[in-house]
Amino acid sequence: MKRNVTAIVTVLAVTGLATAAWASGGGGEHHADSGALLKDFLYRCLNFGVTFGLLAYFVTKPIRKGLAGRREGIEKSLQEAKVAQQAAEAKFAEYDQKLAKASSEIDDIYASIKREGELERDRILAEAKETAKKIEAEAQQAAALEVSKASGELRQEAARLAIEIAREILNKKITEQDQTRLVDEYMQKVGELH
């Protein structure tokens, strides 16, 4: 409102100064219709000032409201994106810890199976070396298969959960094209873990 009042006062001051300058510029000569010209000039200046003031008042207010609303919307979107990113990072850290723990458990299982296989081998060696070789090979194959199977299942579960969480987040914020692109990129990254 202060800007509008300032603009109107400025226009009126300029109009008044222009009128005074125009009126004093005639010197000693006076024309018969100089009063009519002055009246017409003042009317035009007043008309211009009123038109300019109305335009300034009615045009700047919606623009300011629109820009303020747009800024608030952008700030809200950025805040929501930041919260979603933090949630995704927390879930990623959680699954990363679970995957590390699962890898450690797999290593322990593998070591335990290997130890059991060695003990079995030693016991069977007393009976027959040939039988021990077959049992050791079977034990190692079984251990490798169990490790591979457990690792695959854990990765599939982590991928499924990550996709499910990402789908929920993406359904809220991202278009269908963006969802397709992001899922493809994530699946490619999960594939690189194998």
Image (cartoon, helix red, strand yellow):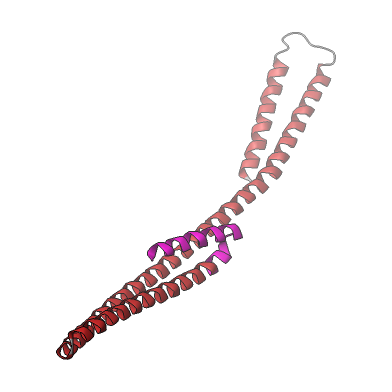
Q: Position of residue 166 (x, y in %)?
A: 50, 67
Q: Main secondary structure of the magenta part?
A: helix
Q: Position of residue 17 (x, y in %)?
A: 66, 24
Q: Position of residue 73 (x, y in %)?
A: 58, 56
Q: Is residue 59 left or right of residue 37?
A: left
Q: Is residue 177 left or right of residue 136?
A: right
Let me know if residue 70 is in the magenta part: no
Out of 148 and 184, give the one closest to the viewer: 148
Report the quarter where the C terminus lies.
bottom left
Out of 140 and 13, give the one closest to the viewer: 140
User: In the orientation shown, which residue stands out farthest toward the top?
Assistant: 28
Q: Position of residue 26 (x, y in %)?
A: 73, 12
Name the residue located 34 percent from the left edge and 79 percent from the top edge. 146
Location of residue 53 by image quarter? top right
The part of the chain drawn in magenta is 168-194
Name the residue located 39 percent from the left edge and 72 percent from the top edge. 95
User: In the orientation shown, which residue stands out farthest toward the left?
Assistant: 126
